[in-house]
Amino acid sequence: MESPSPQPLCPKEALDLLDCATGADFDPDKCLRFLNALRARKESEEVLSISIDQQGRGSNS
C-alpha cells in the first residue's frame, strides 16, 4: 500500500500572499498583511519549510 502524501503546510496563507504579489491590482499593504499571516502561522506551528501543493492546479510552465 502506498503511504499518503503529507499535507502541505500553510497552503492558504502562502497562496494568498503569492496571489497578492502577482495580481494586477497589487496592494503592498494587503500583501504585507498576508505576509504577516503566513509568518504567524509558520511560527505558531513551528513549520520548518513551506510548500504549495500543485495537485489539481493547472501549470503555466
Image (cartoon, helix red, strand yellow):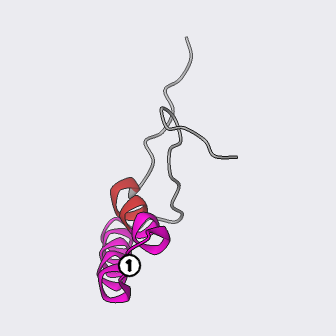
Can you give x and y, in whole percent of width and height, for residue 16 in the image? 36, 64
Question: What's the amino acid at mark 1?
Answer: Leu
Does the magenta stretch mainly form a helix, a strand or a loop? helix
Residue closest to the eye, 29 or 34: 29
Can you give x and y, in whole percent of width and height, for residue 36 in the image? 33, 81
52 horizontally vs 61: left or right: left
Q: Residue at x 43, y 42 (%)?
A: 7
Q: Residues within 10 Å of mark 1 (few under 14, many from 20)?
A: some
- Residue reaching furthest to the bottom: 29
- Residue reaching furthest to the front: 24
15 horizontally vs 60: left or right: left
Can you give x and y, in whole percent of width and height, for residue 38 in the image? 36, 71
Q: Which image quarter: residue 32?
A: bottom left
- Residue reaching furthest to the right: 61
9 horizontally vs 40: left or right: right
The stretch in magenta equals 17-45
Quadrant into which the N terminus falls: top right
Residue 35 lies in the magenta-colored region: yes
Q: Residue at x 39, y 71 (%)?
A: 20
Q: Residue at x 40, y 79 (%)?
A: 26
Can you give x and y, in whole percent of width and height, for residue 47 in the image? 44, 64
Residue closest to the eye, 47 or 15: 15
How many circles with numbers are drawn on the protein? 1
Q: Which image quarter: residue 41?
A: bottom left
Q: Residue at x 40, y 69 (%)?
A: 17
- Residue reaching furthest to the top: 1
Rendered position, 12 above or below 60: below
- Please give the residue where the numbered disc 1 appears in the rendered image: 35
- Quick one: SS at disc 1? helix
